Amino acid sequence: MHVTWYFDFISPFAWLQLRKVLALRERMAVQPVPILFAAVLDKLGQLGPAEIPGKRDFTYRYVHWQAQRQGLPLRFPPAHPFNPLPVLRLCVAAGNSWEAVEKIFVHIWQEGKAADSVDALRDLGRQLGLDDLDTALGSDAVKQAVRANTDAALAAGVFGVPTLRLDEQLFWGDDATGMALDYLADPNCFNAGEYARISTLPQAVQRRR
């Protein structure tokens, strides 16, 4: 089974799921794919949870509560939401390795450090073997790779981050991790009974946009 993890470092839910994805890697290969969440939202005509008053405050409290329940260290970066393009490009420039993915997430969500500029990422870049960070992050190939990742995610039907893709099946969010694991145990578990009926359920009304 081909397993892909689509994520954006801007998402605290990706930090919550990271440890579970790393555990899954002990069983099978998982491909990390950093994408620009804002581009997904733009394509779908949606706002992110941190862009909606009220929902933003609740989301931050909920994430912190979940981290405490899971025994996961969590410290928000100095500002959120932030521009994630520099850190997405850093991940690609560092070879998109799991080592880079982990170190970047720790930098932002465990140590609570900024990641929205080249200057904020210089020390981390050196840790990942990139001494000339301006050149590395300014590379057209690196920029194009982030765009290509995002386009591929949209083509696969991704509508949010983090998303686990197991072959053609998408499982969105940290709280869907258990559902994904059930699918791994039995790929037919969501094909019968009420699952089959709701997959073809008609819409009785649609709101105007």
Image (cartoon, rainbow, N blue to C red):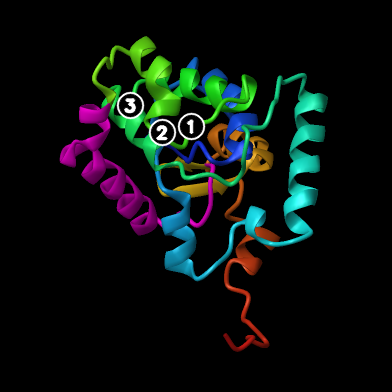
Q: What's under tag 2, amino acid-wise?
A: Val
- Within 10 Å of the Cα at label 3, are there few (<14), some (14-19), or many (20+) other Cα atoms? some
The earlier-in-sequence mark between 2 and 3 is 2
The tag on residue 87 is 2
Q: Quadrant of the C terminus?
A: bottom right
Residue at image coords 75%, 57%: 55
Estimate how packed mark 1 is, as few (under 14), some (14 to 19) or many (20 or more) residues with alpha carbons within 10 Å: many
Is 139 within the magenta?
A: yes
Asked which quadrant contains residue 99, the reply is top left
Quadrant of residue 91 within the rendered picture: top left
| 3D distance between C-alphas at marks 1 and 3 | 16 Å
Q: Is residue 156 magenta?
A: yes
Residue 108, relative to residue 176: is it above or below?
above
Q: Amino acid at mark 1?
A: Ala
Please give left or right for residue 90 compared with residue 28 in the image: left
Tell me the magenta residue range. Answer: 134-162
In the rendering, at what x and y percent does residue 57 appear? 78, 50
Question: In the image, residue 15 lies at what x, y percent?
Answer: 60, 30
Residue 173 against residue 78 in the figure, above or below: below
Q: Mark 1 or mark 3, which is nearer to you?
A: 1
Which residue position is annotated with label 1? Answer: 115
Q: CA distance from mark 2 to mark 1?
A: 6 Å
Q: Residues within 10 Å of mark 2 (few under 14, many from 20)?
A: many
